[in-house]
Amino acid sequence: MVSICMYFQVHQPFRLRKYSIFDIGTKKDYFNEKYNLKLNNEAILRKVSNKCYLPANKLMLKLLNENDFKISYSLSGMAIEQFEKYYPEVLNSFQELVDTKKVEILSETYYHSLSYLYSKEEFKEQIEMHKEKVKNVFGVNPKVFRNTELIYNNEIAKFVEDLGYEGILAEGWDYYLKWRSSNFLYKPKNCNIKLLMKNYKLSDDIAFRFGEKSWKEWPLTIEKFGQWVNAAEGECLNLFMDYETIGEHQWEETGIFEFFKKMPSEILKNPNNNFKTPSEIIKHYNPKDEIDVPNLMSWADVERDVSAWLGNKMQQEALAKIYSVEKLIKENSNKELLDAWRKMQTSDHFYYMCTKWFNDGDVHKYFNPYESPYEAFITYMNVLSDLNIRLKKEEVIIGGKKSKGY
Amino acid sequence: MKVLMFGWEFPPYISGGLGNACYLLTKGLAKEGISITFVIPYAGEEKAEFVNLIGVENIKEFKVKVVNSIIEPYMSNKEYKNKLSKIKNKSLYGNDLYHEVYRFSLAALEIANKEDFDIIHCHDWMTYPAGINVKHLTGKPLVMHIHNTVFDRNSLSPNKYEYDIEKSGFLKSDKIIAISKRVKDSLVNEYKINEDKISVVYWGLDNEKVNEEREKKLMKEKVVLFVGRITMQKGVDYLLQAAKKALDFEKNIRFIVVGSGDMLPQIINKTIELGLSEKINFTGWFNPKEVFKAFQIADLFIMPSVSEPFGLVALEALKNSTPTIISKQSGVSEIINNCLKVDFWDTNDMADKIVNTLRYESLNNELRYNGNLEVEKFTIEKPAKETKEVYIEVLNNG
């Protein structure tokens, strides 16, 4: 008996506008780029919604209504806010999915942040904020947690358990699984919370390799995929991926919609297969073993570590600087400043500063709305300077002269 | 394979990147087993010692032939006449630049008569008439190597005569090597040359290691460095505007301008006008060793060129682990990622990047480290191999 557990991540950051040193002290709308379409959040959200969220939700709704099909989502607060602000229809379509009662919504940090690594208090607050938002929008209480980019270790699992969660998601990385398969429910070391680990091979066959013509399994038909599922050993098969896989990362032309359209009926042809949400997996199966993950693990890159966000000195400086003003910003009563400060914690800002792949000169493989990681850093630090000026009421140079700022 | 190559300058007598680039190319080609006779215009008393001075004694199959001529690289007709007026024996030389270029092309024929070669290879417009003549005489394939065009030398009023010489050179060549896509595009758009005829070959650098022990900086200020001719094309006036703006934010910056050129007096005047005379130093020409030292004390190198067909100096800065800002209007910006890029006219963006690179040690270090790592890919072997491929292609077609 194999249960397929599918989780899709839905996230869009509030990208920082073009912001030069001359804007410091004069522009407060950090996330409001109009002209550069790569940074225009509304334009991007509409584009991704039309290519992915809307058609994918339509398809999923049909599949949920017609089959014994279950899925789960985690929507960052940043994505939900942007749907509310720019494209409410999309949020409605997610609500319709949740209303089928066959969809589980997971918990995460509201700002899709790396806060656990810098401030546990902030981490906790952002989880609370997200919980409240999900309650308001979908009327549900999440029981299972997934951290930003599946960043995980024993300590995080314990912390999340103490917050009252029943389960947590992580990458099924062989380095920690050792001889064990990801296709079972586990427990973190010295914890009672349940641990669901991603089957990265089958997940990434869809998320990364699906449309790649040089891949020896291309084209990946649902029949072939079904055979792989039937051949899989274990109890639960965890397919975790970005929702943008459907239609955005893998374009419609690759046949990705057709693939998902036939998925429930093909998988359910085998009477031993079924679909379950993470909470159902936890209820239905017993932990097979204890997994010890002492170091930070994520679902990113071949390294599966946190180097994509903290790997270089710029990223470390930017992160250290943003969290260094936490106390001050929370003492300040300005809600707008607090919100901007939190939006600047979104992991994407630091990802744009990553130089790991940039060194290969293979810029095309590398997604960055800024011209380079260095420009991403400069933009970020300029905005942070402005935030500091507003926070500390510092003097500022405007038009070559010292001024009061605002 | 034997190549008869026409150039304008060769180390140690160089005024721009061309001499250096030709030196690196011939060195790389020698490693590919190609023998070269390099013909340059030269007039001077040290003529007899010249070949020894160039330091190519360890390169076999390489000889330099000198044509007695007072042509200098990137010289204008006005500069030529100026130079001629100071010479005693005027009758030896042409009465204007174009006449002198013609004279050089006749001398080239004499050399070609005595040399054994398979391919003619010309660098930039002054050598095209020579190359065309030799092609007529011998029927050997002709390769034109384009380092810049008349539009790079003077974008506002391109010289019609030089344009015509260039265009006829491009048309009569069998194959064209452009040193960047930027140059290739200019050939296609401005000269209507068939793009299939043009190969892009980017420059590389010598693999010699940079001295591990870096030059020590004695100044307390952060140093921003410019190296190049002080001409319209190099965008120094834009740098001045950006400097003025950057200094509004960070007082602790010193700008060092290395090089000379026709705009120098104008630029010095503007420096005084802007009140920057205490913040900008003009050093005049530095030899290559001095330039490397300058790179090493600099916290930032900037190349704000209005039009830069390639920009080898940027690779040299990166090789010396100097964080670098280059203009997007440069060929080198097509191949380097680990640097900052600006439009030459966008002095706000330039100031923003100068200030931030000096303000944040982390950014400075990442640019320093990653730029140096990236530049290692651009060796002299690569352009030599690609040039050899062009030679093989023209020989096979011939």
Image: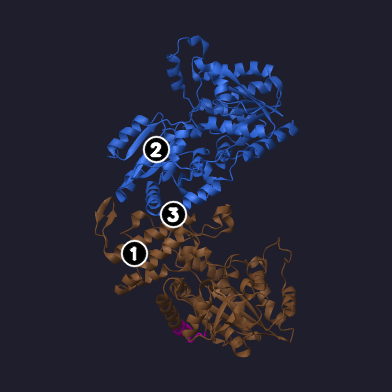
Q: Does the magenta stretch include residue B238?
A: no
Is there a contact, CB below 8 Å, between mark 1 and mark 3?
Answer: no
Q: Closer to the camera, A396 or B139?
A: A396
Q: Residue B2 at what x, y percent from top left?
A: 70, 27
Mark 3, secondary structure of its residue: helix
Q: Residue A303 at what x, y percent from top left?
A: 59, 65
How many other residues sit within 10 Å of disc 2, few (<14), some (14-19) or many (≥20)? many
Q: Is residue A142 magenta?
A: yes
Q: How far apart are marks 1 and 3 (CA)?
A: 20 Å
Mark 2, secondary structure of its residue: helix
Q: Closer to the camera, A374 or A41?
A: A374
Left or right of residue B392: residue B11: left
Q: Residue A69 at what x, y percent from top left?
A: 64, 84
Question: Mark 3 belongs to which amino acid?
Answer: Leu
Chain for colour brown: A
Residue bounds of the magenta highlight: A134-143
Q: Which residue is painted at 74% across and 64% down in the image? A: A216
How many other residues sit within 10 Å of disc 3, few (<14), some (14-19) or many (≥20)? many
- In the depicted structure, whether residue B61 falls above or below residue A205: above
Q: Nearer the viewer's eye, disc 1 or disc 3?
A: 3
Label 3 sits on residue: B363
Quarter holding the N terminus of chain A? bottom right
Mark 1, secondary structure of its residue: helix
User: Visible in this render: residue B99?
Assistant: no
Disc marking residue A387: 1
Label 2 sits on residue: B236
